[in-house]
Image: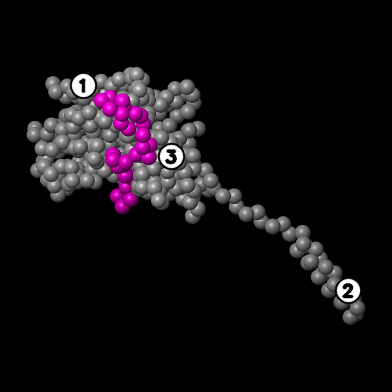
Amino acid sequence: MKKITLSFSVLIATAIFITSCNKKETPAPEADTEFQTAIDASFANTVVTDIDMICGFLGENSYPKFVAPAPGSTGTITVVNNTVSPQSASITFNNTKCMDGKTRSGSIVMTYSFTDINSNYYRDYGFNGNISLNNYVVDGWMIDDSVSLTVGASRIKNLAPASNQNPATTDLRWSIDGYFKMTKIDTPSKKLAWVGTLNKTLSNTKQLLPTALTAVNWSLAVVAYDGTFKGHTLNDVPYTFTVGLENPLVRNYTCSPDKVIGISTTPSVSVINSEFHPFINGVASFTTGTDPKIYPRSIDYGSEGAPCDNSGTILIKGISYKVDFKK
């Protein structure tokens, strides 16, 4: 009986050993490295905030320097301010390579009104601007705003709490809303969409506007955006993009990663600096797609060691990936 029991124990031990040897190891999970959708959504946001930047110049009755024709450009821009009701300001491009390095054609028209009789400019309490894009193309992307969030919605609105706001003590703030569709002209299947609302704060209001009678000098401005927008990236992938007040997206009109865009020879030889002003700081929460297995992303526009560039990091499952954003 002892011999039989011992033999049976050996068989069991052998079976366990063989089973453990044949046990398959669980494969390590694959890293989630999909960040193209975040880059595409960021590009769409750059296009929309560029429009807001242009309207900021137009609303202050000033020349939009960053979209002026670049050295050597054969294109032109035409700015028209209509002071007769309904008041409007427009800018028209003619296949113009601009100072920010982008080529534009078509026009942007801002028809504006005021809820306060003493308001006259973009900086004033009660300013409301409705944006219309007419065959507006940027670097081969047709930008269409034909779909409104609501009937008669204002695209840009001054958020001053009262007509007696003092710019020496309170930063100026606006909202920008709309539904913008973007289509690559040479590849119509490539489409992007941006729909939502951003709030823009002139972060250095106190330095630029000691009184309400002073026009905004956008060439020295630092602006910060917060808010939420949605839409879809290429292949109709839905996304949501959210920026909080604690880490807003920052554009500084005094810095550019592209230092030189051309050389002027009149009246003397001089370097012409670029007017491309990307987001250089801020953090956005980003979700993409409909698959619940896809983790939310965090997009950080700050860059270590380079205070003014067009790169940042995308955080996915605790891993940061350095990326260059689309211009």
Q: Where does the N terminus fall, quadrant-wise?
A: bottom right
Q: Helix, strand or loop at disc 2?
A: helix
User: Which image quadrant is residue 157 in?
Assistant: top left
Return the residue at label 3.
325
Residue 2: x and y in percent read 89, 80
| Residue for point 40% across, 39% down | 42
Please name the amino acid that badge 1 sits on.
Val
Please name the amino acid that badge 2 sits on.
Ser
Q: Is there any visible trace of residue 243 in the rendered image?
A: no
| Residue for point 17% across, 46% down | 206
> Could you give the CA–CA distance between mark 1 and mark 2, rounded to whole angstroms?
101 Å
> Dot 2: within a 10 Å radius of its alpha carbon, few (fewer than 14), some, or many (20 or more) residues?
few
Q: Is residue 78 left or right of residue 313?
A: left
Return the residue at label 2.
7
Return the residue at label 1.
80
User: Which image quadrant is residue 233 in?
Assistant: top left
| Residue for point 35% across, 42% down | 279
